[in-house]
Image (spheres, helix red, strand yellow):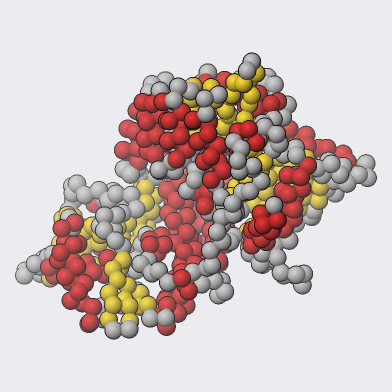
Amino acid sequence: MSYQFFDRDLSWLSFNERVLLEANRQSLPLLERINFLSIYSSNLDEFYRVRVPVMGALHKVISKENAVEAVLHGDELQQAREQILKQQELYGNMLRNDILPKLKQKGIHIIYDEPLPQPIIQPLTDQFLSQVMAFLQPVTIKQGSSFFPENNKLYFLVQLEDEDRKEQLVALNIPSDELPRFYSVNDQEQRYIVFIDDVIRHNLDKVFPQKVTGCWSFKITRDAELELEDEYTGDLAEELEKQLRKRDLGLATRFLYSPGMPLRVLHAFAGVLGLGETSLVVGGHYHNLRDLASLPINDASLKVDKWPALRYTELHETRSVLDDIGTHDHLLHTPYQSYDTILRFFNEAAIRPDVQEIYVSLYRVASDSKIVNALISAAHNGKSVNVLVELKARFDEANNIKWAKKLKASGAKLIYSVTALKVHAKIALVKLRKADRTLYRGLLATGNFNENTSRFYTDHILLTGNHALLREMELLFIFLAKKQKPAKAQVMPFKHLLVAQFNLQERFMEMIDTEIANHKAGKPASVIIKMNNLEEEKLISKLYEASNAGVKVQLIVRSICRLVPGVAGQSENITVTRIVDRYLEHGRIFIFDNDGDPLVYMGSADWMNRNIYHRIEVCFPVVDERLKQEVIKMMDLQLKDNVQAVRLDTQLHNIPVNTTEPVVRSQLQIYQLLQQRTSTI
């Protein structure tokens, strides 16, 4: 049967639109709305760095092979451009006509594409002369110029005219990566916040002796892909460092410029830079508006009330975490609950004399990681520390290389994945020796071992002493240490864990098949899945098959979703929910009714091509009945969310949930649920 699928990139743009719509929510405090504008801008920059090069390359390949497909794919490129333009218009209108005027009413005037008020000119000029001017590096633009705009850095293109009325173009850096993007000046009861762009623009006469006849801001976004051979056999860390130095020199994917730049100037400048094939995009008066997150405003009334992370009190406070989880499983839910328990797990493993071996996979770690410092201490304390550091975690490569060097220097054994296969699993194993027995303790998580992102990513961490489960984890670490890609016929004894490249895809399909068979037999049957991204066609097709068989399928998909819901004969029994709130939804949860005895799995794996076919992922069962019911309750709250949730329709629109049911804001109610449980223990 032929099924329909959404385009991957148009679906992602639909998600970024959902982020933008959150910035338009009138009930949110102003700084929270600005924060969502910042997130939208950051997301869009990454889209141009990561996805636009892929879309362009795919279009070229298809054009050579299939004219009809080329037309269709070209239409997707055009749709993406139109969608982005529409979103940016909404962005500009929202910021200019709604948010900034409301801030001004509260005594905060952000100067946005307007002349500097007279009372603040002198103090800003003083700032320019004493602080900013030293960082300016003008470069004359002419044919053969060596000027090379760095990725996503800000510049002015300044047009000058000398006494003979001869024109000259000069590129001038805007040093927002070295200086604050915003300057704050008070004048009586009014507070002004000014972009560094405008501080420089107002003082151009102090930089150039010639007459300034034009000034336009611009930036170039460059392809972020690293070029690594599938079977690279040298020092991977060393090769990655070389590639990282080249990343910001990648091919330009977008030339973004402010309105009003004359076409003759635009094309002359693009020609000098060799940007003929680049997407020329007219933007707003300012670029890199992700910097809005750093506005120098610290007014609590303009922010949401904090939800303090809850102390996890279910572990015995006077006992060791490693001992306590040997008696029964625990499940931690961040950021609702404090990450301190996880830090305590690693700290105990580092210091306890009965701990002999530690195994852990690290994908994205904090820049000041307490976890890695604990591992370094463990190695110094004589323990066998085995760390799989994924050096190819996009945009975290440099940080991971830094920690890998420190771990290696401490005596830890480092394991790197093969070049073409990322290890995305979030797992840790500790082996203890008591008398003549070896005991296992472990962590299995849906998110990275990162105490910084744990403050705003919703994730789940299972702490367990389940010997059978952890023995399988040990076998996986042993396999990964061999640094080999798994053979197609590879057999590993994974009866509890679901591991991509081995049994993950097959087991998920089997569990869906069971729901189909149960429904046909008149038994209870349903599938509930939460993930970040849903792309892989075989698994989507299996969900379509379940829908056609009458199985109710409820999906919560934060971002990319290629499954088209609500289509007769394909997916009329499938709903897709998106939730955007104060925390980033990140956990992956899979619930299968299983004739009234639910199977509950969690893990690192989205259903994307890269996760299924090019990564090592681990999903794990939640077997403790109390913990299973806790997860099911949380998912039920999210499916009932009628405040922050939207439903995806057949046209990729984000449709608000209209209901007369009681108000359910799932993140708030999950927090309250855990808060109540904490206070009653």
The percent position of residue 140, horizontal first and vertical second, equals: 15, 55
Query: In the image shown, does 504 or 69 lie closer to the viewer?
Result: 504
Judged left or right of residue 611, residue 119 is: left
Query: In the image shown, does 508 or 347 lie closer to the viewer?
Result: 347
Residue extending farthest to the right is 522
The answer to whether one can see residue 200 in this image is yes
**Which residue is pictured at 69% across the width and 26% down the height?**
467
Judged left or right of residue 146, residue 466 is: right
**Which residue is pictured at 29% across the width and 54% down the height?**
177
Res 475 → quadrant: top right
The answer to whether one can see residue 240 in this image is no
Res 470 → quadrant: top right
The percent position of residue 545, horizontal first and vertical second, equals: 79, 43
Q: In this figure, what is the number of numbered marks?
A: 0
Is 376 located above or below residue 129 in the figure? above
Residue extending farthest to the front is 318
Indicate the quadrant containing the N terminus: top left, top right, bottom left or bottom right. top right
The percent position of residue 649, horizontal first and vertical second, equals: 68, 60
**Which residue is pictured at 67% across the width and 32% down the height?**
326
Query: In the image shown, does 627 or 573 lie closer to the viewer?
Result: 627
Residue extending farthest to the top is 436
Judged left or right of residue 65, residue 248 is: left
Is 424 located above or below residue 139 in the figure? above
Judged left or right of residue 563, residue 24 is: left
Is 89 located above or below residue 446 in the figure? below
**Which residue is pictured at 32% across the width and 32% down the height?**
242
The percent position of residue 273, horizontal first and vertical second, equals: 26, 50
